[in-house]
């Protein structure tokens, strides 16, 4: 639970980006109850906190009136909405036309903690996932009356707040020492440093929180790939090509494989490297697609569309251990996608 605690502690700060907490689980798992409990501790509300709407204007309005915004029982956000969620997480501003005018505008500051509940992971963009903590919630073995649980939580709330404020103190006190321990490579640096400080104060070794979050991001990426038709078919194609890799010192000449078969796979210094043209990837993804309803709809049908789809999942692939890049091969005019596959367990 250290990542959740670190996220909630970070919500107490006003000067740093706030991670997006997404609680995922089946109906009756208590996702909403947990979200309400966290919001009650950080941003008290008289009664049950309302859920924000999904339209951009509704989201901006909710941010203006709350420090912690609750999005309950959400599905995949509409196109463009995830960009707004990222800006709210990091902190920024939006400009809107003032009501009842044609020329006047107003600038609104947007920075808030966000808690989402969903039946399945709903965030799809790579930059949004970088800012998110996805927590899977299981159904309880037995239920208790909701009023009873709320009354018990209300009694414990002073202790909860005391613990959170103490951990906030620890994270501020030890931040300089923790920051000097490593080079911080994740964009949510403040949250990672808070988590490291809390983890070490609880007796965990240095690097515990960073390693834990790295494994969580990998799992989130694998869940994304499993649920995305294009990404799932792409990984199947890459694994199939990688199985045919032969030891080599470098990639073969582009002209030897560019047209037929359109791809090559070699093993360089123990790592498998796959290179393929966008057209070959387009054809392979169609062959490996296991969702017939998606053929011709969510799958790209041209080399240019395939390049766009690859750019969309590039960050997710990296978190799953597959490094992808569009590179010049055997000359500046010859470009292909190059994939550095994950190390095997024995390496």
Image (cartoon, rainbow, N blue to C red):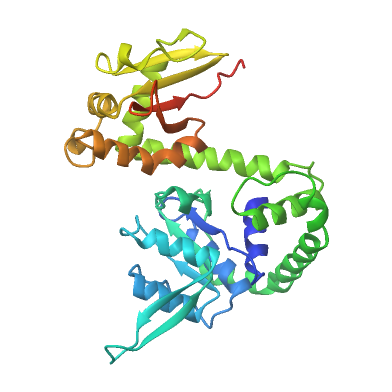
**Image spot of residue 135 (x, y percent):** 53, 50
Residue 276, image x and y in percent?
A: 34, 23
Residue farthest to the top? 247
Q: Nearer the viewer, residue 251 or 92?
A: 251
Image x and y of residue 68, in percent: 54, 71
Taking depth in this image into account, of 241 and 260 the one nearest to the observer is: 260
28 to 234, vertically: above or below: below
Q: Does residue 204 show up?
A: yes
User: Is residue 83 rendered to the left or right of residue 309?
Assistant: right
Q: Identify which residue is drawn at 43% across, 11% down.
A: 245
Position above or below: 257 against 13: above
Q: Is residue 269 above or below residue 123?
A: above
Tag count: 0
- Residue lying at the far front in this picture: please name it: 332
Residue 281 locus on image (x, y percent): 29, 27
- Please report the residue visible at 33 percent of the width from the left and 18 percent of the height from the top: 263
**Residue at left offset 78%, top offset 58%:** 175
Q: From this view, report whether residue 165 is shown above or below residue 141.
A: below
Q: Quadrant of the C terminus?
A: top right
């Amino acid at each position: 639970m250290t990542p959740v605690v670190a996220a909630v502690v970070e919500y107490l700060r006003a000067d740093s980006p706030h991670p997006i907490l997404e609680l995922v689980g089946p109906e009756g798992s208590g996702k909403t109850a947990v979200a309400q409990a966290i919001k009650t501790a950080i941003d008290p509300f008289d009664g049950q906190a309302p859920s924000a709407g999904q339209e951009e204007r509704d989201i901006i309005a909710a941010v203006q009136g709350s420090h912690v915004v609750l999005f309950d029982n959400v599905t995949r956000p509409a196109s463009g909405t995830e960009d707004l969620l990222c800006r709210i997480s990091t902190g920024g501003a939006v400009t809107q036309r003032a009501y009842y005018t044609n020329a006047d505008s107003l600038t609104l500051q947007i920075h808030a903690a966000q808690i989402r509940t969903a039946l399945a992971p709903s965030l799809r963009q790579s930059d949004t996932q970088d800012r998110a903590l996805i927590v899977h919630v299981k159904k309880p073995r037995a239920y208790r009356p909701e009023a009873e649980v709320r009354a018990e939580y209300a009694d414990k709330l002073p202790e909860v707040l005391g613990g959170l404020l103490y951990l906030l103190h620890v994270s501020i006190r030890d931040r300089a020492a923790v920051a000097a321990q490593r080079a911080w490579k994740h964009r949510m640096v403040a949250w990672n440093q808070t988590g490291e400080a809390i983890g070490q104060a609880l007796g965990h070794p240095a690097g515990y929180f960073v390693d834990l979050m790295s494994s969580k991001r990998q799992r989130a990426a694998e869940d994304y790939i499993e649920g995305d038709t294009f990404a799932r078919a792409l990984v199947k194609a890459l694994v199939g090509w990688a199985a045919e890799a032969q030891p080599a010192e470098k990639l073969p000449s582009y002209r030897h494989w560019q047209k037929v078969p359109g791809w090559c796979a070699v093993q360089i210094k123990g790592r498998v490297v796959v290179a393929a043209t966008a057209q070959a990837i387009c054809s392979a993804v169609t062959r490996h697609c296991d969702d017939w309803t998606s053929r011709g709809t969510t799958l790209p049908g041209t080399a240019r569309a395939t390049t766009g789809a690859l750019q969309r999942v590039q960050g997710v692939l990296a978190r799953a251990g597959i490094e992808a890049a569009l590179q010049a091969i055997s000359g500046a005019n010859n470009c292909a996608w190059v994939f550095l596959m994950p190390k095997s367990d024995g390496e």
